Amino acid sequence: MNSSPWWKEATIYQIYPRSFFDSNGDGEGDLPGVTSKLDYVKSLGVDAIWLSPFFTSPNKDGGYDVANPRDVDPRFGNLEDARELITQAHMRDLRVIADIVPNHFSDQHEWFQAALKAKRTSKERERFHFYDANEDGTPPNNWISLFGGPSWTQVEDGQFYLHLFDSSQPDLNWENPEVNADFEKTLRFWIDLGVDGFRIDVAHGLIKEDVLTNHPDPQGLSNALRLDVAMDSEVRNALLLTVPYFDRQGVHEVYRKWRKLFDSYGEREIMAVAEAWVHPPVNATRYVRADELHQVFNFDLLTAEFDANVLFDVVERSISLNATVNALPTWALSNHDSPRVASRIGDEQARALALFVFGLPGSTYVFAGQELGLPDGQLQDSDRQDPTFFRTNGAIKGRDGARVPLPWGGDTIPFGFSTGKPWLPISQSWKDLTVESELADPKSSLHLYKNALELRKEFLVGAGGITWLESPQHGDKNDSLLSYSRGSITVVMNLSDSAQECEADGKLVMVSSGTVDARDGIKVIPARSTAWFLS
Ligand code: NOJ
């Protein structure tokens, strides 16, 4: 019997509900749609689903603008649908992770509406960050929102409120005990409804310090904080060291309290994963100290080049840093905020990287559609909905490309996603990338994921650490191969554009693309491909 908690080395499938499956023909995915596809989800071999927000929301930022955190938005269904989804998931031994958004509310939340009507100094305004204008009428500081434009919006009586994201997402004041109490109520509400864990949005953002201080390069900083803006990594890292509003020590007090709340549910093993993109990377380990959260996302693979030196550093650093706090790393190649991995590094490379990552210790996150090898959707500007696009006057296209609805089957648009018009257009070129057509093709990305996740469960979960065999610092020390062994599996990734010999022991059990030539006892790994060997 496995005595580890369920989340320790789980594979977690991220569902963006609006884009998953539409059960009522309105062009948008919904909770009953997710429930109806749980058999498919289960068949992938994952352990849990993480649902991006489905709470009451005007949907200015894809539901990350929450107007009532303890109810379901009608576009997704109702509380009964949420309960049914959780019940049906549990019947299939799938855990459910909800996505909680504590850094900000929607401006439609009753607290913010009350704050707008209240006086300048009032308990209603103290729940947010309201400040007077500077003497010359300008906002309290020069910070730029992560979605572009100023981080401040002025209200009728002249005060400004802080919003690190869209103006419809006022930041909450976590120095206020009422805010703490309200979120504890929300956590208990969803745990009581049956959820098994939480993904904590902007987990590093709750506490603000030096709110009245300007930043020397606010626009550069805002760009550096976006996963979809490419930037030289040295420039990015230097900027990330200067963020005045993220990763303050006070956030850890919040998570120590939350951990006690989670632990009070005992055997239910409630877990939480922090979305905390912090710098330097060692700071991320603070979120997973024994009395804080269970996991913290490692975002490095969302931007890393397909390069042996880069990938070796990312993997080695994440494993060793997490080990200092007795935690295991997390791995993600795609999510709803970043370009899809197949578009970012190429189709074959994405398959190779997935196989490389599935062998590693820790939890692995798979963004719905990644298993199909979906690229980013091709959109016209007139289709776009991401607030970033509007707040930057189109200079940054935004994240909609990764959020195009999933193609399920059939030969014509919208490939079974909806009987209506999908909220973002699906391209006809996805005909061969539907679940139906990939199920029929044994060489598809879908089969690769299913096979890999099955083998991962059988041979790798709980198999301990890795031993590097080939890297720029191990073995032949060339830049073409990355290889490690773990338990009875040896994983070899060939990053180069030509076939490469390797010395792996064991019998071939899987290859991400191409054919491994093993004549004469020498194993030759195809270009841009990863193979697993079992000994
Ligand atoms: C991170 C979420 O993943 C993203 O989608 C959202 O826009 C921001 N946080 C603000 O909540």
Image (tube, grey):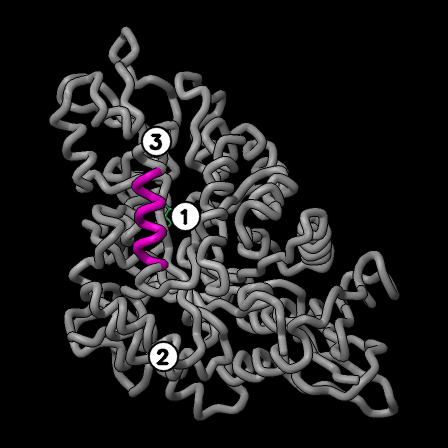
- Looking at marks 1 and 2 on the same chain, the residue that comes earlier in the sequence is marked by 2
Task: Quote the CA–CA distance across marks 1 and 2.
Answer: 24 Å
Identify the mark at residue 391; answer none if there is no mark. Answer: none
Q: Amino acid at mark 3?
A: Pro
Asked if the stretch drawn in magenta spans residue 203, the answer is no
Q: Amino acid at mark 1?
A: Asp
Q: Is residue 450 left or right of residue 467?
A: left
Circle 2 residue: 38
Identify the mark at residue 177; answer none if there is no mark. Answer: 3
Foreground of the two, 11 or 142: 11
- Looking at marks 3 and 2 on the same chain, the residue that comes earlier in the sequence is marked by 2
Residue 392, position in %: x, y?
A: 32, 39
Which residue is pictured at 68% across the width and 57% down the height? 315
Asked if the stretch drawn in magenta spans residue 189, the answer is yes
Dots 1 and 2: beta carbons under 8 Å? no
Task: Quote the CA–CA distance across marks 1 and 3.
Answer: 20 Å
**What segment is highlighted magenta in the picture?**
181-191
Structural crowding at the residue carrying mark 2, measured as other residues with C-alpha within 10 Å and reported as few (<14), some (14–19) or many (≥20)? some
Circle 1 residue: 201
What SS does tag 3 mark?
helix
